[in-house]
Image (cartoon, rainbow, N blue to C red):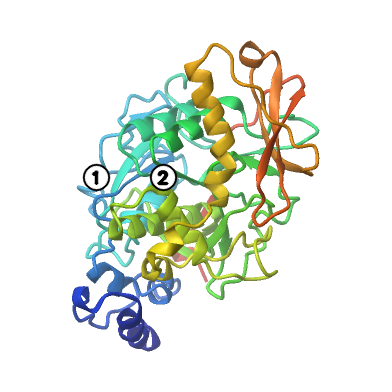
């Protein structure tokens, strides 16, 4: 911890947390290598939060990725048996990334790595990791992955106790090729997770310098889409810009662990920002275990630091996350409207109606609403070849309306990709 950080921990902790639960917080060095410290520990006053009981305790975070190397000391005892949708025969506790960066392990280390074994510490060290391996680019494939593997992984995570589902991945969609940016299987899986009371978090993409194509699952309704900022809270050039972007988080010069204990990389990406946002949600939820997903997410959104254009914008979303402010906020914040979950509510209600009745109720169209960017495909065998195009309303974050259109549904052929990259610490200048 920097000198300024040590002073701020004491001052801010006294202001934002109940005095009765605050033990003394000793000054400590900021974790991370000297060339790339984990600066958010100082900015978010993490030692004070931990000592006040906000350390991820009781929260399971699913990491849907290349698998997580569970036997490295920094993660030992923190990684639960999970699932392998690559068909490699594991239970998710092996990292199948072809690259030494070890993407899934890197993301898990940002969430829950223990101190004492390396310079790098996770933001929510008492949280548990549920690893779910999926067939991403650059991942070792020994078997035959099932169809819609990532959608199945989301369902698995929701059905096996994950309160937060973290996906540092994405597949770009282009209007010239794909009429449906969020395939129906993926949207249905997200709705399933929401119905189970989980929060779904995904990377916005690293295509800020190349057009920022829409990416699934970040574009899907009900998903917290995350962009990246640097230590000055400036949005990075690579972070994709989207009107549906939810928040931004640290994603530049981020140190992570690999599947080799003690080995460290420093990398950039909305992958890292996604993992840190998931960890921040775990901190908040561990402090308020009786609150539901909506209330926890409300805290994160309502207390984000607004940057750039005033209000929600394509670069920052509602702002840069601040878990310390989210934890300090009063209960009234948790009761506010929620643009992410409110946007998914019509489809969630429709999916429940479909499950309960042979045919779904007709959608209520609002012709005065301008068309938005969210498009959710419905296979012909389910709804006579129709799909729902959600339109953004004019008030606040946008009340969403359903417009029923008839189209042919195409399937995207691109595979999901990592949304982060790493460089060996030894090569970093």
Nearest to the observer: residue 61 or residue 2: 61
Could you tell me residue 138's position as x and y percent? 52, 37
Local secondary structure at mark 2: helix
Q: Cα distance, mark 2 to mark 1?
A: 13 Å
Residue 335 drawn above or below residue 391: below
- Can you tell which of label 2 and label 1 is closer to the viewer? 2
What residue appears at the point 46 percent right and 39 percent down from the top-left corner?
98
Q: Residue 151 in the image: x percent, y percent? A: 49, 29
Badge 1 marks a residue whose secondary structure is loop
Q: Is residue 57 left or right of residue 202?
A: left
Sequence-wise, the earlier of marks 2 and 1 is: 1
Which residue lies at the image location 37% right of the left edge and 48% below the top edge? Answer: 292
Label at residue 71: 1
Residue in front for this viewpoint, 87 or 346: 346
Residue 2, located in which quarter of the rendered image?
bottom left
Q: Label 2 belongs to which residue? A: 104
Q: Height in image: 404 above or below 269?
A: above
In percent of the image, x 62 and y 42: which residue is there? 219
Q: Is residue 416 visible?
A: no
């Amino acid at each position: 911890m920097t000198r300024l950080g040590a002073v701020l921990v004491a001052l801010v902790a006294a202001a934002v947390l109940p005095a009765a639960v605050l033990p003394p917080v000793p000054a400590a060095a900021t974790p991370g290598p000297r060339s790339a410290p984990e600066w958010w520990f100082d900015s978010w006053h993490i030692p004070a939060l931990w000592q006040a009981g906000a350390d991820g305790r009781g929260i399971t975070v699913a990491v849907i990725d290349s698998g997580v190397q569970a036997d490295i000391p920094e993660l030992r005892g923190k990684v639960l048996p999970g699932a392998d949708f690559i068909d490699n025969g594991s239970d998710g506790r092996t990292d199948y990334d072809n690259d030494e960066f070890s993407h899934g392990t890197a993301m898990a280390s940002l969430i829950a790595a223990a101190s004492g074994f390396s310079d790098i510490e996770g933001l929510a060290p008492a949280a548990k990791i549920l690893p779910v391996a999926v067939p991403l680019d650059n991942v070792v494939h020994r078997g035959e992955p099932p169809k819609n593997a990532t959608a199945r992984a989301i369902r698995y995570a929701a059905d096996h106790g994950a309160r937060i589902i973290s996906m540092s991945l994405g597949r770009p969609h282009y209007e010239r090729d794909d009429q449906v940016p969020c395939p129906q299987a993926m949207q249905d899986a997200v709705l399933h997770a929401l119905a189970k009371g989980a929060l779904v978090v995904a990377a916005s993409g690293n295509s800020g310098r190349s057009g920022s194509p829409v990416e699934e699952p970040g574009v899907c309704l009900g998903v917290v889409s995350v962009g990246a900022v640097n230590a000055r809270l400036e949005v990075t050039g690579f972070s994709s810009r989207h009107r549906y972007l939810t928040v931004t988080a640290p994603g530049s010069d981020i140190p992570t662990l690999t599947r080799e204990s003690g080995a460290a990389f420093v990398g950039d990406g909305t992958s890292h920002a996604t993992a840190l946002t998931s960890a921040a949600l775990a901190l908040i939820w561990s402090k308020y275990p009786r609150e539901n997903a909506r209330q926890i997410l409300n805290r994160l959104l309502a207390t984000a630091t607004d940057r750039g254009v005033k209000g929600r914008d394509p670069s920052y979303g509602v702002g840069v996350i601040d878990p310390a402010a989210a934890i300090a906020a009063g209960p009234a914040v948790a009761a506010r409207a929620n643009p992410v979950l409110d946007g998914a509510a019509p489809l969630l209600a429709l999916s429940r109606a479909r499950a309960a009745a042979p045919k779904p109720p007709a959608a209520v169209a609002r012709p005065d609403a301008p068309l938005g960017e969210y498009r959710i495909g419905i296979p012909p065998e389910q709804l006579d070849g129709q799909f729902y195009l959600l339109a953004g309303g004019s008030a606040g974050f946008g009340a969403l309306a359903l417009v029923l259109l008839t189209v042919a549904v195409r399937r995207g052929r691109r595979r999901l990709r990592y949304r982060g990259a790493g460089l060996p610490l030894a090569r970093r200048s």
